[in-house]
Amino acid sequence: IQRTFSIIKPDATRRNLTGKINAKFEEAGLRIVAQKRIHLTKAQAGQFYIVHAARPFYDELCEFMASGPIIAQVLEGENAVVRNREIMGATNPKDAAAGTIRAEFAESVGENSVHGSDAPEAAAEEIAFFFAGLEIV
Ligand code: ATP
Ligand code: MG
């Protein structure tokens, strides 16, 4: 059993898609073991996405992630990191496989509805960034 970190991004909370996206996770066998709705400041978004600081889209990404509430969540299941990436689909919705969250809901490569950790080490860091141990059940 593995845990991964997920974010339902502002474009999706704005369009009231939280339930539809959570249904995708649950139908795929991932369990939502922690979840909270928060509104990041641009500085907090910048800290979370610090690995992308040198990328040309960094400023736009931070602005977007602070543009509305997000749902931060911990997902648990067999092979959760890889499984979640499969359910999310490719970064750019144009390249995302049919049936994936990004294929169905994402608006663009930037406003792509969900974030998911890309490795177990990243998952542990990202979970610790948002949650205290007692909040994960
Ligand atoms: P995430 O880390 O959000 O799960 P990802 O791992 O599929 O997505 P990354 O390469 O880590 O993709 O990029 C992080 C985020 O930065 C993307 O999800 C997207 O919101 C944004 N992003 C990536 N590429 C671009 C781009 N070319 N233009 C604008 N925004 C982008
Ligand atoms: Mg990533």
Image (spheres, rainbow, N blue to C red):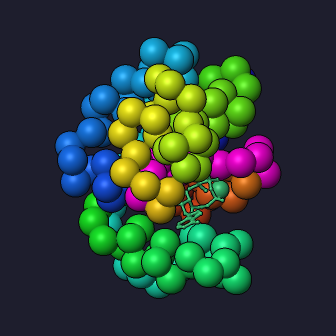
Left or right placement of residue 49 versus residue 8 in this view = right
Q: In this view, does 110 lie above or below 113?
A: below
On the image, which quarter does residue 83 sit in? Answer: top right
Can residue 54 be seen here? The reply is: yes
Q: In this view, does 20 lie above or below 121?
A: above
Name the residue at 53% across, 17% down: 28
Name the residue at 45% across, 15% down: 27
Left or right placement of residue 113 versus residue 128 in this view = left
Which one is nearer the viewer's eye here, 124 or 49?
A: 49
- Which x, y percent locates residue 64? 39, 70
Name the residue at 70% across, 21% down: 78
Which one is nearer the viewer's eye here, 14 or 137?
A: 14
- Which x, y percent locates residue 33? 49, 33
In the image as oriented, which residue stretches furthest toward the front? Answer: 94
- Which x, y percent locates residue 65? 41, 68
- Which x, y percent locates residue 115? 53, 50
The magenta-colored residue range is 111-121
| Image quarter (top left, top right, bottom left or bottom right) of the N terminus | top right
Q: In this view, does 61 lie above or below 3?
A: below
On the image, which quarter does residue 84 sit in? Answer: top right
